[in-house]
Image (cartoon, rainbow, N blue to C red):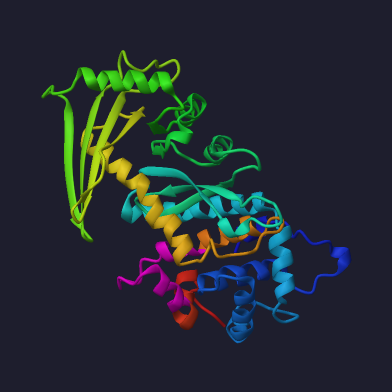
């Protein structure tokens, strides 16, 4: 609640405001936590739970209308909202680190909110920072119109504390300026290398060709079976010395290659080969684990937002509303993931339903200790 005080009410006092701004934000957070995916859902849930809300909110003029909730979402400054979120989640990570260990790897990856495109406007694209060990979102940044992730990633990194952490980014973020920024903030990078850095890619490819069959190369093999498919992976690492120019890629000490192949039924995929550079001295096993954690963002964040929060089905598209709704979903996701009191192995979808149906579950997730 104290963090919400830092956000300015976007409404003009001269117009008269029937509802308290901070109370509106609390209702929005509680409703999205409680399995509400649309503004219509939020309004209906709030009216249904008015008696419960009045146990800790004043609600001087009752529950706001659907139009009021939507106006707030459209007008709310997303930068302020995201700054509040980052400060709040920093406290959550700090509290959890005592038991779980600090989030050692941060994966940065983007996702398009497909339903937000309307009237000729492109759907918004959000870049998120995800603490892979804790399963928490640390921040998000909207990609500017007619731009790409290269412009959003530096802004997101600037807002994060990454000292001592390994930041993983796909090929889009393999930029000299981004590597330098991560090192300047005392973090380490693990960047995928593709054709957007042709000279670097060629140098790494040649290095691994020269070392083909050499027994001393550090390699790690993994075979996973499940759901009717078998995935085989070989990770290899070499020293970056003499291969990668440290003036362009500061403190780069490791180059890596991952070869993977998938068999589904009797169909075998083509060999997929990916290359990496890192400022951390990684073993082959550590490289493989970090890469798996990075791509886990698809299942543990993007897939969850689509399936459990119906993000792509949302048709809210005007002004700041899509961005602010995206932030609300991530707040709810973090609240659920940070709740360590529920030992049942329920899906996130069922945990949201539990928050919707059971006032006690919702109070526990929101950290409400005593209610008048």
The image shows residue 307 at horizontal and vertical percentages of 45, 65
Q: Depth check: 361 or 266 in front?
A: 266
Q: Residue at x 52, y 26 (%)?
A: 177
Q: Residue at x 71, y 60 (%)?
A: 74
Q: Depth check: 309 or 136 in front?
A: 309
Q: Residue at x 79, y 74 (%)?
A: 18
Residue 95 makes an appearance in the image? no
With respect to residue 241, does 38 lie above or below?
below
Q: Residue furthest front?
A: 266
- What is the span of residues highlighted in magenta in the rendered image? 332-355
- Image quadrant where residue 282 sits: top left
Q: Residue furthest top?
A: 242
Q: Depth check: 186 or 307 in front?
A: 307
Q: Residue furthest right?
A: 14
The image shows residue 170 at horizontal and vertical percentages of 42, 38
Q: Is residue 213 left or right of residue 134?
A: left
Magenta-drawn stretch, dominant element (helix, strand or loop): helix
Q: Is residue 175 left or right of residue 314?
A: left
The image shows residue 269 at horizontal and vertical percentages of 25, 45
């Amino acid at each position: 609640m104290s963090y919400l005080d830092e956000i300015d009410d976007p409404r003009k006092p001269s117009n008269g405001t029937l509802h308290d701004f901070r109370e509106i934000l609390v209702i929005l957070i509680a409703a999205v936590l409680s399995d509400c995916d649309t503004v219509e859902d939020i309004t209906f849930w709030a009216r249904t739970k008015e008696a419960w809300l009045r146990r800790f909110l004043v609600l001087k003029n009752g529950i706001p209308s659907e139009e009021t909730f939507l106006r707030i979402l459209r007008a709310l400054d997303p930068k302020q909202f995201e700054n509040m979120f980052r400060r709040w989640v920093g406290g959550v990570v700090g509290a959890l680190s005592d038991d779980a260990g600090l989030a050692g790897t941060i994966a940065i990856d983007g996702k398009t909110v497909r339903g937000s495109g309307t009237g000729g406007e492109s759907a918004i694209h959000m870049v998120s920072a995800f603490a892979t060990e804790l399963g928490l979102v640390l921040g998000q940044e909207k990609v500017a119109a007619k731009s790409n992730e290269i412009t959003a990633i530096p802004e997101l990194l600037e807002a994060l504390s990454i000292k001592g952490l390994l930041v993983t980014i796909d090929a889009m973020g393999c930029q000299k300026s981004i590597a330098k920024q991560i090192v300047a903030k005392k973090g380490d990078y693990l960047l995928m290398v593709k054709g957007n850095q042709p000279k670097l890619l060629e140098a790494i490819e040649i290095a691994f060709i020269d070392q083909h069959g050499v027994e001393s190369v550090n390699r790690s093999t993994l075979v996973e079976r499940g759901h009717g498919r078998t995935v085989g992976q070989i990770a290899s690492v070499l020293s970056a010395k003499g291969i990668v120019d440290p003036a362009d890629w500061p403190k780069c000490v490791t180059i890596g290659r991952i070869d993977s192949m998938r068999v589904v039924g009797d169909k075998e995929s083509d060999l997929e080969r990916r290359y990496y550079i890192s400022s951390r001295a990684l073993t082959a096993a550590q490289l493989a684990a970090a890469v798996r954690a990075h791509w886990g963002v698809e299942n543990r964040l993007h897939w969850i937002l689509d399936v459990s929060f119906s993000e792509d089905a949302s048709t809210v598209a005007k002004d700041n509303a899509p961005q602010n709704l995206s932030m609300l979903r991530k707040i709810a996701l973090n609240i659920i993931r940070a709740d360590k009191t529920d030992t049942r192995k329920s899906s996130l979808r069922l945990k949201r339903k539990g928050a919707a149906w059971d006032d006690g579950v919702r109070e526990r997730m929101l950290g409400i200790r005593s209610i008048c």
